[in-house]
Amino acid sequence: MNTGNQRRSRVQGGWAATSSGASSRLKSSATAVSSSDIACSKKGDKLPMNNAISQKEKMKAPIWLGKNIDQVVPKSKYVFEYPEEEIKVKPEDQVILKPGVYDISTEPSGLSRLRYFPQFIEFSRSEAIFAELYDSIEWHQRYDIHNGVHAIQPRLTQWYSDLPYTYSGITVEANTSEWPKALKELKEQLIEVTGIEFNSLAANLYRDGHDSIGWHTDDEPIMGKRPVIASLSFGEERVFELRKKPPMNESGERDYTYSQVIRIPLRSGALLIMEGCTQLDWQHRVPKEYHDRGPRINITFRVARPVEKS
Ligand SMILES: O=C(O)CCC(=O)C(=O)O
Ligand SMILES: [Fe+2]
């Protein structure tokens, strides 16, 4: 509502500016605009009195106060301003199907590298190995601890190493029992092709499509900072997924909504080697599947060394 000393004239849907009000603001910010330009007044019309707007009103008068159809709009008013909020776009999921060496990220921490050999072991041998491992490994049902709560692992496992292994809140004791023959042979074959002296292994038996392993990293201290992990698969094909770790927020949490995801089908006889910073900068998992899947065995060869106490 206009009060006596705040009176302005309404002209064709806009507020008629005063020479000392909005018009003076426009003059100072762009090319000089005369009061007749601004007010679209007929000759002889009276412009509102300058002193009709209080000093306070002039200060808070909105920028569009003097806008009118004849007004020359200073270009600078339409300069595009970038939104302050960061716009995040989730990169498209990638699928790796061809054999090769894949450098999946380069962070300040270093390079994360995968080596993928879909048919490292020929099919008939891999099926024979599956049968041998299924029968000869003493499979265990273990539990994870999440936030103090025990949860049954949706798979069976075994660990072979002179050292105990701690992950997901549980410690699996060292297991110095003799390795099944197939595992000894596979270890020698991998040492030969990689030059890495693997000395430990974790075995998983996924009984069907409902068995899985959740997002995790194999970053147990006994494996060192940039472990090389060689993973062999036998039996039913399952999809192995990796997702990039985003930076932590102020509360130490990570939001994976926009993370890059890589999928790799691991069929019987496939070898996948994770190395460099893959355990630092990425997580991996084998998700549940909702259609029929037969059993699958996965063996991950690792190098475990006692952790030096500082
Ligand atoms: O089953 C797989 O392919 C992965 C197993 C794994 O990530 C693990 O044992 O840490
Ligand atoms: Fe793992």
Image (cartoon, rainbow, N blue to C red):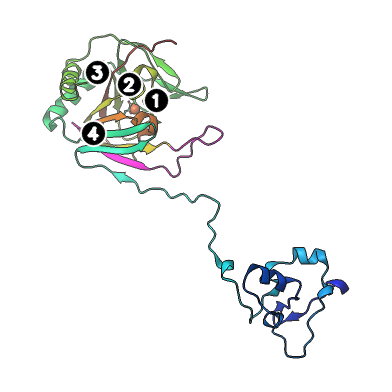
In the picture, the disc for residue 157 is 2
Q: Quadrant of ligand 2?
A: top left
The answer to whether the residue labelled 4 contacts the one labelled 1, judged by CB atoms less than 8 Å apart, is no
179 sits left or right of 110 in the view: left
Depth check: 164 or 281 in front?
281
Examine the image and state in which quarter residue 47 appears.
Answer: bottom right
Q: Position of residue 69 (x, y in %)?
A: 63, 81
In the rendered structure, which disc, 2 or 4, sits on the residue that comes first in sequence? 4
Residue at the spot of label 3:
198
Q: Position of residue 166 (x, y in %)?
A: 40, 17
Q: Position of residue 161 (x, y in %)?
A: 30, 13
Q: CA distance from mark 1 to mark 3?
A: 26 Å
Residue at the spot of label 1:
153
Q: CA distance from mark 3 to mark 4?
A: 16 Å
- Residues rendered magenta in the picture: 246-272
Depth check: 179 or 305 in front?
305
Q: Nearer the viewer, mark 3 or mark 2?
A: 3
Residue at the spot of label 4:
115
Q: Main secondary structure of the magenta part?
A: loop
Examine the image and state in which quarter residue 155 appears.
Answer: top left
Secondary structure found at label 1 = loop
